[in-house]
Image: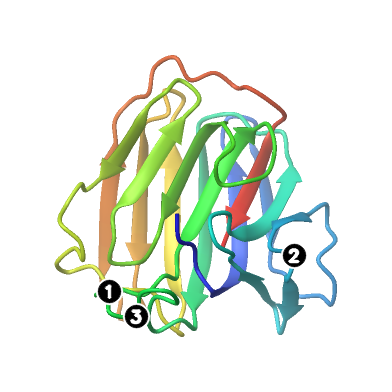
Amino acid sequence: MKVLGIALLSSLSLCCQLAGQTFTDDFNRLNLGNGWYVWGNHNVSLVSGELRTYGEWGEGGGIVRSLAVSFPLSFLFDFRTLNVTDDFQPSLPYNDGGWFIAFNDQSAGLTTTAQIKFFQPAGSRNIYRQTSGGISDVQPNATEPIPGWQDFGAVPSHIKGTINADLSAKITITYPSGQAVSVIFGPAPGSAEIGRASCRERV
Protein backbone atom coordinates (compact mmCIF):
# COMPACT_ATOMS: atom_id res chain seq x y z
CA MET A 1 0.00 0.00 0.00
CA LYS A 2 1.27 3.46 -0.88
CA VAL A 3 1.00 6.03 1.86
CA LEU A 4 1.32 9.77 1.88
CA GLY A 5 4.49 11.82 1.84
CA ILE A 6 3.65 14.68 4.17
CA ALA A 7 0.45 15.55 5.97
CA LEU A 8 -0.52 18.24 8.42
CA LEU A 9 -3.09 17.72 11.13
CA SER A 10 -4.07 20.89 12.93
CA SER A 11 -6.45 19.56 15.58
CA LEU A 12 -8.02 16.37 16.87
CA SER A 13 -11.10 15.92 19.01
CA LEU A 14 -12.54 12.62 20.23
CA CYS A 15 -15.89 12.62 22.00
CA CYS A 16 -16.82 9.42 23.83
CA GLN A 17 -20.53 10.05 24.12
CA LEU A 18 -21.32 6.89 26.07
CA ALA A 19 -18.98 7.81 28.90
CA GLY A 20 -19.86 11.50 28.69
CA GLN A 21 -16.25 12.52 28.25
CA THR A 22 -14.32 14.52 25.70
CA PHE A 23 -10.67 14.39 24.68
CA THR A 24 -9.29 17.30 22.67
CA ASP A 25 -5.77 18.16 21.51
CA ASP A 26 -4.88 21.31 19.55
CA PHE A 27 -1.13 20.47 19.30
CA ASN A 28 -0.29 24.04 20.26
CA ARG A 29 3.00 23.28 22.03
CA LEU A 30 6.65 22.51 21.28
CA ASN A 31 6.77 18.75 21.89
CA LEU A 32 4.33 15.91 21.16
CA GLY A 33 3.81 14.70 24.75
CA ASN A 34 0.28 14.63 26.17
CA GLY A 35 0.28 10.81 26.18
CA TRP A 36 0.99 10.43 22.45
CA TYR A 37 3.80 8.38 20.98
CA VAL A 38 4.95 7.86 17.40
CA TRP A 39 4.52 4.82 15.16
CA GLY A 40 5.82 4.08 11.65
CA ASN A 41 7.90 6.91 10.25
CA HIS A 42 9.20 8.73 13.32
CA ASN A 43 9.70 12.03 11.48
CA VAL A 44 6.94 13.80 13.45
CA SER A 45 6.92 17.40 14.64
CA LEU A 46 4.65 20.13 15.96
CA VAL A 47 4.89 23.41 14.08
CA SER A 48 2.67 26.43 14.81
CA GLY A 49 -0.11 24.31 16.30
CA GLU A 50 0.01 21.63 13.59
CA LEU A 51 1.05 18.00 13.84
CA ARG A 52 3.26 17.12 10.87
CA THR A 53 3.79 13.48 9.94
CA TYR A 54 5.48 11.72 7.04
CA GLY A 55 4.46 8.41 5.53
CA GLU A 56 6.70 5.62 4.35
CA TRP A 57 6.23 2.82 1.88
CA GLY A 58 3.73 0.21 3.08
CA GLU A 59 3.42 1.46 6.63
CA GLY A 60 2.76 5.17 7.00
CA GLY A 61 3.46 7.19 10.07
CA GLY A 62 1.43 8.79 12.79
CA ILE A 63 0.69 8.96 16.48
CA VAL A 64 -1.10 6.73 18.98
CA ARG A 65 -2.30 7.02 22.58
CA SER A 66 -4.39 5.05 25.05
CA LEU A 67 -7.87 6.26 25.94
CA ALA A 68 -10.90 4.74 27.61
CA VAL A 69 -12.84 4.33 24.35
CA SER A 70 -16.34 2.90 24.03
CA PHE A 71 -19.11 3.34 21.48
CA PRO A 72 -20.95 5.37 20.39
CA LEU A 73 -18.37 8.10 19.90
CA SER A 74 -17.58 10.92 17.54
CA PHE A 75 -14.27 12.22 16.25
CA LEU A 76 -13.22 15.24 14.27
CA PHE A 77 -10.01 16.71 12.96
CA ASP A 78 -8.70 19.13 10.35
CA PHE A 79 -6.42 17.66 7.70
CA ARG A 80 -4.24 19.06 4.94
CA THR A 81 -1.34 17.90 2.79
CA LEU A 82 1.38 19.61 0.78
CA ASN A 83 1.54 16.80 -1.76
CA VAL A 84 0.23 17.82 -5.15
CA THR A 85 0.85 14.49 -6.91
CA ASP A 86 1.45 10.89 -5.87
CA ASP A 87 5.12 10.55 -4.84
CA PHE A 88 5.70 7.31 -6.70
CA GLN A 89 3.15 7.53 -9.53
CA PRO A 90 2.77 11.24 -10.37
CA SER A 91 0.61 10.42 -13.42
CA LEU A 92 -2.26 9.21 -11.20
CA PRO A 93 -5.36 11.46 -11.23
CA TYR A 94 -5.11 12.10 -7.46
CA ASN A 95 -2.41 12.89 -4.92
CA ASP A 96 -1.44 10.58 -2.03
CA GLY A 97 -2.36 12.76 0.95
CA GLY A 98 -4.62 10.55 3.06
CA TRP A 99 -5.69 9.82 6.63
CA PHE A 100 -6.19 6.83 8.94
CA ILE A 101 -7.82 6.44 12.35
CA ALA A 102 -8.33 3.30 14.47
CA PHE A 103 -9.97 2.46 17.80
CA ASN A 104 -9.38 -0.35 20.30
CA ASP A 105 -6.32 -1.75 18.57
CA GLN A 106 -3.65 -4.16 19.71
CA SER A 107 -0.52 -2.44 18.38
CA ALA A 108 0.36 0.52 16.19
CA GLY A 109 0.44 0.14 12.42
CA LEU A 110 -1.70 0.19 9.30
CA THR A 111 -1.90 -3.59 9.03
CA THR A 112 -2.65 -4.43 12.69
CA THR A 113 -6.09 -5.54 13.85
CA ALA A 114 -8.38 -3.00 15.52
CA GLN A 115 -11.99 -3.20 16.63
CA ILE A 116 -12.64 -0.62 13.91
CA LYS A 117 -10.50 1.52 11.63
CA PHE A 118 -11.06 3.84 8.71
CA PHE A 119 -8.67 5.11 6.06
CA GLN A 120 -8.79 7.18 2.91
CA PRO A 121 -5.71 7.07 0.63
CA ALA A 122 -6.57 10.43 -1.00
CA GLY A 123 -9.38 12.96 -0.82
CA SER A 124 -10.95 11.95 -4.12
CA ARG A 125 -10.81 8.23 -3.33
CA ASN A 126 -13.11 5.87 -1.40
CA ILE A 127 -13.13 5.54 2.40
CA TYR A 128 -12.34 2.06 3.74
CA ARG A 129 -13.54 0.39 6.94
CA GLN A 130 -12.03 -2.71 8.57
CA THR A 131 -13.13 -4.40 11.81
CA SER A 132 -11.87 -7.14 14.11
CA GLY A 133 -14.91 -9.21 13.08
CA GLY A 134 -13.59 -9.52 9.54
CA ILE A 135 -15.72 -6.80 7.98
CA SER A 136 -13.87 -4.99 5.19
CA ASP A 137 -15.91 -2.60 3.10
CA VAL A 138 -15.68 0.68 1.24
CA GLN A 139 -17.93 3.67 0.70
CA PRO A 140 -19.25 5.10 -1.52
CA ASN A 141 -17.64 2.27 -3.54
CA ALA A 142 -17.39 4.49 -6.61
CA THR A 143 -14.99 4.72 -9.52
CA GLU A 144 -11.96 6.84 -8.59
CA PRO A 145 -11.39 9.72 -8.65
CA ILE A 146 -14.92 10.11 -7.33
CA PRO A 147 -16.88 12.82 -9.19
CA GLY A 148 -17.52 15.82 -6.94
CA TRP A 149 -14.93 14.76 -4.35
CA GLN A 150 -11.71 16.75 -3.99
CA ASP A 151 -8.12 15.86 -3.17
CA PHE A 152 -6.81 17.31 0.07
CA GLY A 153 -4.55 20.31 -0.38
CA ALA A 154 -2.69 23.03 1.50
CA VAL A 155 -5.87 24.49 3.05
CA PRO A 156 -7.36 22.19 5.73
CA SER A 157 -10.48 20.11 5.21
CA HIS A 158 -12.66 19.19 8.18
CA ILE A 159 -13.25 15.47 8.79
CA LYS A 160 -15.96 14.38 11.21
CA GLY A 161 -17.20 10.91 12.06
CA THR A 162 -19.71 9.18 14.30
CA ILE A 163 -19.39 5.49 15.22
CA ASN A 164 -22.39 3.77 16.81
CA ALA A 165 -22.45 0.85 19.25
CA ASP A 166 -23.06 -1.60 16.36
CA LEU A 167 -20.06 -0.04 14.53
CA SER A 168 -22.25 1.52 11.88
CA ALA A 169 -20.80 4.91 11.07
CA LYS A 170 -21.13 8.16 9.19
CA ILE A 171 -18.13 10.20 8.02
CA THR A 172 -18.43 13.70 6.58
CA ILE A 173 -15.66 15.66 4.86
CA THR A 174 -16.09 19.40 4.48
CA TYR A 175 -13.74 21.02 1.99
CA PRO A 176 -12.32 24.55 2.34
CA SER A 177 -14.96 25.76 -0.15
CA GLY A 178 -17.72 24.67 2.26
CA GLN A 179 -18.82 21.77 0.05
CA ALA A 180 -19.37 18.57 2.05
CA VAL A 181 -19.54 14.87 1.14
CA SER A 182 -20.65 12.02 3.41
CA VAL A 183 -20.55 8.22 3.51
CA ILE A 184 -22.54 5.80 5.67
CA PHE A 185 -21.38 2.34 6.79
CA GLY A 186 -23.87 -0.26 8.01
CA PRO A 187 -23.59 -2.36 11.21
CA ALA A 188 -20.55 -4.61 11.61
CA PRO A 189 -21.56 -7.65 13.73
CA GLY A 190 -19.04 -9.76 15.64
CA SER A 191 -16.39 -7.07 15.99
CA ALA A 192 -15.19 -7.17 19.59
CA GLU A 193 -12.58 -5.09 21.32
CA ILE A 194 -9.34 -7.03 20.88
CA GLY A 195 -6.79 -4.98 22.80
CA ARG A 196 -6.21 -1.84 24.76
CA ALA A 197 -8.46 1.12 24.23
CA SER A 198 -6.62 3.52 22.01
CA CYS A 199 -6.96 5.79 19.07
CA ARG A 200 -4.46 6.66 16.43
CA GLU A 201 -3.87 8.87 13.49
CA ARG A 202 -2.04 7.88 10.38
CA VAL A 203 -1.74 11.29 8.77
Estimate the spatial distance between the alpha carbons at disc 2 and disc 1, rounded to whole Å. Answer: 27 Å
Of tags 2 and 1, the one toward the viewer is 1
- Of residues 76 and 114, the one drawn nearer to the viewer in this rendering: 114
Q: Going from the N terminus, do you reach mark 2 or mark 3 first?
A: 2
Q: In terms of secondary structure, where does tag 1 sit?
A: loop
Residue at horizontal 63 percent and vertical 32 percent from the top: 104
Left or right: residue 22 versus residue 145 is right
Residue at horizontal 59 percent and vertical 64 percent from the top: 56
Left or right: residue 50 versus residue 17 is right
Q: What is the x, y in percent for residue 77?
A: 53, 62
Up/down of 61 relative to 78, above or below = above
Q: Residues within 10 Å of mark 2 (few under 14, many from 20)?
A: some
The mark found on residue 121 in the picture is none
The mark found on residue 92 in the picture is 1
Tell whether label 1 touches label 3 (CB within 8 Å).
Answer: yes
- The quadrant where residue 147 appears: bottom left
Tag count in the figure?
3
Quadrant that contains the N terminus: bottom left
Quadrant that contains the C terminus: bottom right
Residue most extreme to the top = 190
Q: Residues within 10 Å of mark 3 (few under 14, many from 20)?
A: few
Residue at horizontal 68 percent and vertical 31 percent from the top: 106
Q: What is the x, y in percent for residue 146?
A: 19, 63
Up/down of 48 relative to 175, above or below = below
Q: What is the x, y in percent for residue 125?
A: 29, 60
Residue where numbered disc 2 is placed: 42
Q: What is the x, y in percent for residue 128?
A: 36, 45
Residue where numbered disc 3 is placed: 90
